[in-house]
């Protein structure tokens, strides 16, 4: 693991001989008993993927200067309009993040590139880095990897795009990775910095918050909102494919989804996720039946077994989950919050356990309540060529 501060990195010594998963878990929590479940045979393989749909390397930002983001609360119905982060709350949020980090690194043995943020950055939502960048590998062996940067609606979130972090991601992805700056498609002002762009009247697209990727099939699901524009999503697809010199995104599936109060859901990744052979989706949040059918049919065509969640479970962040590969065994796990895990019924858990080796979770209720995002939002996946990052 590597921890990144605002200006320099600190390397930690790691044991040369990796411990087994059971040993790691027993050291972390002696009272934990875990059975490693071998996934059942997956669905018939598709002709598309030549790379994994999930990864064992991610980037995270510890909430070392967390604040309730008043700008974001305007259209994020999953957070309070007038929340305040006292010193006690900030400490609680940091402790919750530490538990999540321990689950990811110790239980799943995933490699985490860990950064911090400070007051002078002016980034209250920095703990959610998946919204400002994403990395992609092509669907065949002949293309380039891609790093995409995204136009975010809230001005204070645009400051999350930091030079030190971007340079680190570029180094990990290697010299052949191409940069696609979607911000220039949103506000094509010559020589202008997107940080100065207006908050209204422009199309926005907020990374893997707005875009839920089925990476193996090359399908992008986009729940349209003020933070996810259909036209810009299509421009993103074309630009990413052009930069890769082959297909990364074959199809964009747009739709609208709504919460229990009838409000437009701000980010796609709070109502659905897609794993290697399964998906968790709040289908009842898609009110238009034609759009709902389009999502269901696409998932079925790509061999995904759907775990349908209710709006109540979505409010518990059951859709805000992510598949990660175990760093030692290479098997898929799904990770979510404890609140999300507790909302699932036995049948839903049984379906998931047919496809993954386990359901990992961490209790981050304070961050969920005041930040309006959950586990998936805190994780930016790093899809890089192995010969670059090893």
Image (cartoon, helix red, strand yellow):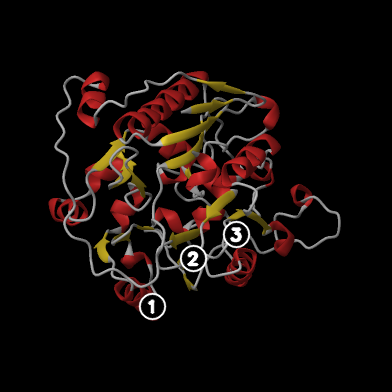
The residues bearing labels 2 and 1 have C-alpha atoms spaced at a distance of 12 Å
7 vs 245, nearest the viewer: 245
**Above or below for 34 versus 276:** above
Residue under label 1? 294
Measuring from the top left, give residue 218's x and y in whole percent: 45, 67
Measuring from the top left, give residue 205's x and y in whole percent: 60, 59
Q: Earlier in the sequence, mark 2 or mark 1?
A: 2
Q: Say which residue appears at 49% left-offset and 63% top-offset.
A: 141
Residue under label 3? 205
Residue 128 in sight: no
Q: Say which residue appears at 69% left-offset and 40% top-offset.
A: 159
The answer to which image quadrant residue 148 occupies is bottom right
In the image, farthest residue toward the bottom: 290
Answer few, some or many: residues within 10 Å of disc 3's Cα (few below 14, many 20 plus, some between 14 and 19).
many
Q: Earlier in the sequence, mark 3 or mark 2?
A: 3
**Above or below for 328 versus 261:** above
Query: Tag on residue 222?
Result: 2
The answer to which image quadrant residue 179 occupies is bottom right
Q: Say which residue appears at 23% left-offset and 66% top-offset.
A: 43
Q: Is residue 386 left or right of residue 350?
A: right
> Which element carries disc 1, helix, strand or loop?
helix
Residue 4 in sight: yes
Measuring from the top left, give residue 346's x and y in whole percent: 13, 51
Answer few, some or many: residues within 10 Å of disc 2's Cα (few below 14, many 20 plus, some between 14 and 19).
many
């Amino acid at each position: 693991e590597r921890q990144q501060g605002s200006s320099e990195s600190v390397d930690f010594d790691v044991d040369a001989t990796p411990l087994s998963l059971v040993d790691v878990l027993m050291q972390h929590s002696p009272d934990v008993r875990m059975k490693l479940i071998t996934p059942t045979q997956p669905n018939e393989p598709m002709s598309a993927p030549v790379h994994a749909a999930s990864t064992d390397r991610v980037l995270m930002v510890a909430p070392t200067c967390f604040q309730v983001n008043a700008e974001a609360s305007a259209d994020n119905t999953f957070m309070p309009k007038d929340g305040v982060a006292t010193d006690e709350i900030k400490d609680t949020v940091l402790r919750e993040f530490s538990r999540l980090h321990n689950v990811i690194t110790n239980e799943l043995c995933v490699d985490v590139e860990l950064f911090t943020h400070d007051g002078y950055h002016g980034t209250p939502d920095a703990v959610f880095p998946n919204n400002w960048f994403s990395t992609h590998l092509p669907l065949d062996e002949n293309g380039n990897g891609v790093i995409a940067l995204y136009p975010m609606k809230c001005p204070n979130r645009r400051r999350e795009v930091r030079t030190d972090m971007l340079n680190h991601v570029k180094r990990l992805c290697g010299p052949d990775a191409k940069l696609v700056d979607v911000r220039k498609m949103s506000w094509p002002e010559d020589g202008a910095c997107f940080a100065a762009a207006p908050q209204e009247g422009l199309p926005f697209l907020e990374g893997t918050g707005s875009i839920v990727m089925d990476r193996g099939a090359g399908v992008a699901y986009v729940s349209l909102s003020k933070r996810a524009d259909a036209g810009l999503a299509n421009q993103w697809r074309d630009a990413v494919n052009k930069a890769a010199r082959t297909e990364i995104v074959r199809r964009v599936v747009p739709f609208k989804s709504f919460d229990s109060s009838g409000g437009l859901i701000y980010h796609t990744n709070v109502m659905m996720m897609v794993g290697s052979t399964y998906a968790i989706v709040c289908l009842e949040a898609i009110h238009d039946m034609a759009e709902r059918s389009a999502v269901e049919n696409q998932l079925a065509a790509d061999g995904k077994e759907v775990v349908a969640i209710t709006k109540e479970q979505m409010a518990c962040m059951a859709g805000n989950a992510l598949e990660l590969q175990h760093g030692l065994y290479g098997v898929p796990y799904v990770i979510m919050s404890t609140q999300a895990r507790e909302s699932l019924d036995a049948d839903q858990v049984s379906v998931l356990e047919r496809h993954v080796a386990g359901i990992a979770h961490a209790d981050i209720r304070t961050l969920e309540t005041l930040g309006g995002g959950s586990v998936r939002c805190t994780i930016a996946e790093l899809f890089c060529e192995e010969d670059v990052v090893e």
